[in-house]
Amino acid sequence: MSKWMVTAKRADFNGIAERFGISPVLARLIRNRDVIEEDDIRKFLYGDCEDLYDPLLLKDMEQAVAIILEKIAEDKQIRIIGDYDIDGICSTYILYKGLSHCGAKVDTAIPHRIKDGYGLNENLIEEAKAAGTDTVVTCDNGIAAYSQIAYANELGMTVVVTDHHEVPYEDTEDGRMYKLPPAAAVVDPKRQDCMYPFSEICGAVVAYKLVLALVAAKQGMTWKEVLYSELGQELLELAAFATIGDVMELKDENRIIVKCGLSLMANTRNLGLKALIDVTGVDAEHMKPYTIGFVLGPCLNATGRLDTAVNALELFKTTDKAEAARLAGDLKAMNDSRKELTLEGVEEAVWQIETQKLLDDRVLVVYLPKVHESLAGIIAGRIREKYGKPTFVLTDAEEGVKGSGRSIEAFHMYEEMTRCKELFTKYGGHKLAAGLSLRKEDVDTFRKAINQNCTLTEADFEEKVMIDVAMPMSYANIDFVKELDRLEPFGNGNSKPQFAQKNVRFVKGRLLGQNKNVGKYTVADETGKLYEMIYFGNIEGFHEYLEAKYTAEQVAALYNGRGNDISLSVVYYPEINEFRGNVTVQMVMKYYQ
């Protein structure tokens, strides 16, 4: 079930429209995204690289820069240790390229998902020491590696942490006590004592800020001069790529980074990224967050899931065109394989949930021992989407059981896991996603504990459909739809606007696509004016709804061009459709009732 709600945030929409040269509806849409202050509205509409925040506002940034510059001057060996997902790969490349530019003696290591697991471990520390490493710089990890960093200190190494994850804590009688790792510098916007204006940046942006500050200090430049340099512009692309890939909210600084980064990718400076764009056949001139999130990004993630993320890092590093093409082809082929394995895993999870009486659980914990552990997070996400519940998918690992969780807005996954942390051998994550390891014998105990602690109510599971404006489709002309482009880039935290209209009559329809799973309709408003409407959602569910509300005969009549009786309220957004030179507006139906 879904509950439709019109966003009712107040402001002087006419005044905002007049000051910024936009329509009152666009002013309302911007306010609905909690952009309120004049300067924030300006940044939302016109923001560019000039509006990015000074890297030195990050706590310990000056310290990190000073340490690394000293190590470069002393010709000490530096090792960057990243992570095997999109953010970790991009972070590692950004630091590698930046430190190399400054003349550092630097190499990289990315943990193997199966052998090493997430983040630092003693084995990675020992390997670094054996390779003659003096200084370890982490990226997209390290904030929770207290004992591992203490071990590196004992071995005489220096550690600089760059991360963006939550700082571990314990709830005590005196309140929440946060525990920073014993590194020489800890750069993480989630630190309680960090005054950085926007804490929701990804690991690659933290790494990018370090490079801007480092190169500026090394070469006697300002950080903005570095940003606009050839190096700064290439690495900005990767920071944007990671921001989308790590599903960060496209608000504040993130939105500007993605907006600028996507425009740069049309003529990317990175040979590997260019090869990946070519092999996947995406339109480089019209890069969207969707392109990164669902086409390019999964190719990077797939190599870290099924093989080693070193391949993806090598793609970004290579300066050989033929090598870039080979690596990009391998990554695409691996992602195609990953898709098939994921589908099998989702089917197994659904079967288990519906045959083992798990549907009554408020938090779904699915144990799939034979599924490749690297696919747990993707499968958890698909199951969460299907059932609308927080979901953990667990698989057999080399030692015990490992898994990933994906959550809903009302369930803070990391905090809820902390309430039963004694069951885990390792865990970490965010509000909406997490990873964990535990003993096989504790799987059922975990399922019971996470559900017993759960305080979610029926209202928390009800899908809330937020409508920006109850707006007649007649308002959505070509000029208005073009104006909506000013809200882009769309993605997490800045969704496409949604409008609603009652009493939309479905006049005729046809099914499109190889599988006949897309509905294309001619609809009419209350005045009889006709519009084109398309539906990409669950077409079988739509037909079942229509047949239950009306009749099968009326649904058949709709597709025979004789529909006059079917009338619905719809949530839609308008888009421009270009076909054989004709430019028209079509409505995309999102919800109906």
Image (cartoon, rainbow, N blue to C red):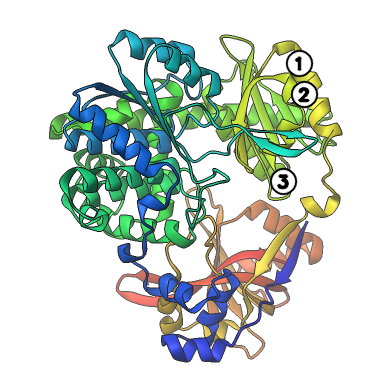
Instruction: Residue 290 in the image: state x and y as whole percent.
Output: 43, 52
Disc 1 packing (10 Å; few <14; some 14–19; many ≥20): some
Label 1 secondary element: helix
Q: What residue is shown with label 2?
A: 446
Residue 271 picture quarter: top left
| Amino acid carrying mark 3 in the image | Gly
Please state which of residues 272 and 585 is positioned toward the viewer in this rendering: 272
According to the picture, the residue beneath numbered tag 1 turns out to be: 442
> Is 40 situated left or right of 438 in this image?
left
The answer to which quarter of the image holds residue 352 is: top right
SS class, disc 2: helix
Vertical side of 563 occupied by 401: above or below: above
- First in sequence: mark 1 vs mark 3: 3
Residue 101 percent across, percent down from the top left = 17, 37
Disc on the earlier residue, 2 or 3 = 3
x and y percentages locating residue 57 in the rendered image: 41, 53
Placement of the N terminus among the 4 image quadrants: bottom right
For the question of whether residue 328 can be seen, the reply is no
Instruction: Name the residue: 29% across, 33% down.
Output: 68
**Mark 1 or 3: the one toward you:** 1
Do callouts 1 and 3 mark residues in contact (Cβ within 8 Å)? Answer: no
Residue 434 visible from this viewpoint: yes
Amino acid, disc 1:
Asp
Q: Which mark is residue 337?
A: none
Q: Amino acid at mark 2?
A: Phe
Between the C-alphas of marks 2 and 1, the distance is 6 Å
Q: Nearer the viewer, residue 253 or 483?
A: 253
Of labels 2 and 3, the one closer to you: 2
Query: Where 462 sits versus 43, above or below?
Result: above
